[in-house]
Amino acid sequence: MLPTGLSSVYFACSDAAGIAGNIFAFVLFVSPIPTFRRIIRNQSTEQFSGLPYMYALLNCLISLWYGMPFVSPGIILVATVNSIGAIFQFVYITIFIIYADKAKKLKMSGMLISVFAIFVLVVLMSLEFLDPHERQMVVGYLSVASLISMFASPLLVINLVIKTKSVEYMPFYLSFATFLMSLSFFVYGILKSDLFIYIPNGIGTILGIVQLILYYYYSSKVSEDLKDPLVDQYV
């Protein structure tokens, strides 16, 4: 049991970390807006894939459920960030379906129905068949699984950067926001003693650091390469 003064500081720090995580997550949620402006302007989804937004929606819904007070008391900031994220992903998917060709439209519509069906099933099963402790554990494991699956995207970006030796497809501000969001929720999870929060976000923090290192390395390399021809030109 912490003294009153230390307890107040402890809760203030955990809330600050959670709020920071919400802010940095918002930056990530709005980052696809230019892509969807292009889709609306061209009235076509072109070669863009809607799958990342579908996976993100499922992750947000399950994590939202995990953050609800009757599943995991005391981590409401997890619920708030994922409720906002779910709204953004649903809007993106809706736009994608509207402007997709017939084959993609049917595929994405079917997947959207499946995502909501899975979410409803998780909610009903956890409420009907699990006691409070079991509910938190089961939904927590599902949340971790969905979060870790989301790391496929940073891994693909990292692989692309190494393969192309270019940071063109890894904007700095997105990598930095991803790192700060993961770090914030890692700290939040540590302070809340919730391994279902700090383990996946710890992994996300490490991946964020790797992205920033790669960005620094390859952007510096490009700068050096640009200098050499200029020197040779005047020799």
Image (spheres, rainbow, N blue to C red):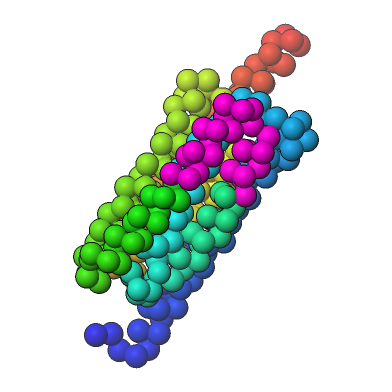
Q: Residue at x 40, y 78 (%)?
A: 11
Residue closer to the observer: 111 or 31: 111
Residue 47, x across and y down, in percent: 61, 25
Please identify the residue farthest to the right as the structure is shown.
Answer: 41
Q: Quadrant of the C terminus?
A: top right
Residue closer to the observer: 110 or 31: 110
Residue closer to the observer: 118 or 47: 118
**Residue 200 located within the stretch drawn in magenta:** no
In the figure, residue 150 lies in which quadrant?
top left
Q: Residue at x 40, y 85 (%)?
A: 8
Number of numbered discs overlaid on the protein picture:
0
Q: Which residues are magenta?
A: 91-114
Residue 65 can be seen in this image: yes
Q: Quadrant of the N terminus?
A: bottom left
Residue 138, x across and y down, in percent: 25, 58
Q: Residue at x 48, y 45 (%)?
A: 113
**Residue 101 located within the stretch drawn in magenta:** yes
Residue 135, x across and y down, in percent: 26, 65
Q: Residue at x 41, y 36 (%)?
A: 152
- Up-down: is 32 above or below 129? above
Residue 56 can be seen in this image: no
- Per the picture, the main secondary structure of the magenta-coloured stretch is helix
In the figure, residue 196 lies in which quadrant?
bottom left
In the figure, residue 105 lies in which quadrant?
top right
- Up-down: is 111 above or below 134? above
- For this view, does 209 lie left or right of residue 53? left
- Up-down: is 80 above or below 151? below
Residue 94, x across and y down, in percent: 62, 45
- Up-down: is 133 above or below 54? below
